[in-house]
Amino acid sequence: MTHKILVIHGPNLNMLGKREPETYGADTLADINAALVRHGQTQDASVTAFQSNMEGEIITKIQQAFGNYDGLIINPAAYTHTSIGIRDAVLLLDMPVVEVHLSNIHKREAFRRHSYLSDVVSGQIVGFGMQGYILALDAILHILKQS
Ligand code: DQA
């Protein structure tokens, strides 16, 4: 059975490649999404990607995942550290959810160390750049195969 996986990218991640490459790497969002789609094809998973700079749009997209997807990969970017709304939307979901950060948020500024999501997701992957998304996809597919 093909698993349907949604990937949500938060604010400023559309600027990857140009944005602080020393922190976030040279890969663009298109590179990341293409790598996820390719990896999904080898694992019988279909990957759909969405990016928004707006909190409400991200919340609506998470709500739409309910009943329509089997798993969610989310990098809420700056909203990680501020958004109870995104946390509450994730709590709606009855599916594996993996939080990804390109950078290791735990070794940066103190305000990045707290995530409103970390205690309501299946797991968090930080600090591995683009590879973190691939690891997240594998983690979700592993959970889905077990259930
Ligand atoms: C980020 C880390 C956040 O603190 C930051 O606001 C981002 C990107 C990451 O992927 O490392 O925009 O989520």
Image (spheres, rainbow, N blue to C red):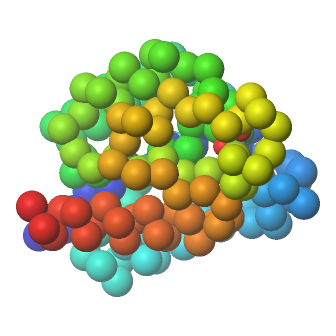
Residue 17 position by quadrant: bottom right
Ligand 1: image quarter: top right
* Placement of the C terminus among the 4 image quadrants: bottom left
- Name the residue: 84% across, 56% down: 23
Point out residue 56 in the picture as x, y percentages from the top left corner.
51, 17
Q: Where residue 24 sits: x, y (%)?
A: 79, 57
Residue under the image location 22 percent in, 51 percent down = 70
Please say if 52 is above or below 40: above
Residue 128 coordinates in the image, percent (x, y): 65, 67
Q: How many marks?
A: 0
Find residue 9 and report its image quarter.
Answer: top right
Relative to 3, residue 109 above or below: above
Picture layout, residue 85 above or below residue 71: above
Whether residue 30 is visible here, answered yes or no, is no
Q: Is 74 situated left or right of 41 in this image?
A: right
Q: Residue furthest bottom?
A: 42
Residue at 74% in and 29% down: 111
Residue visible at 53% across and 57% down?
125
Question: Residue 146, relative to residue 38: is it above or below?
Answer: above
Residue 9 visible to an observer of this rendering: yes
User: Which of the image's four quarters has the N terminus?
Assistant: bottom left
Q: Quadrant of residue 132?
A: bottom right
Instruction: Pick whichever, 35 or 97, lies toward us.
Output: 97
Q: Is residue 68 left or right of residue 134?
A: left
Residue 68 % position (x, y): 21, 41
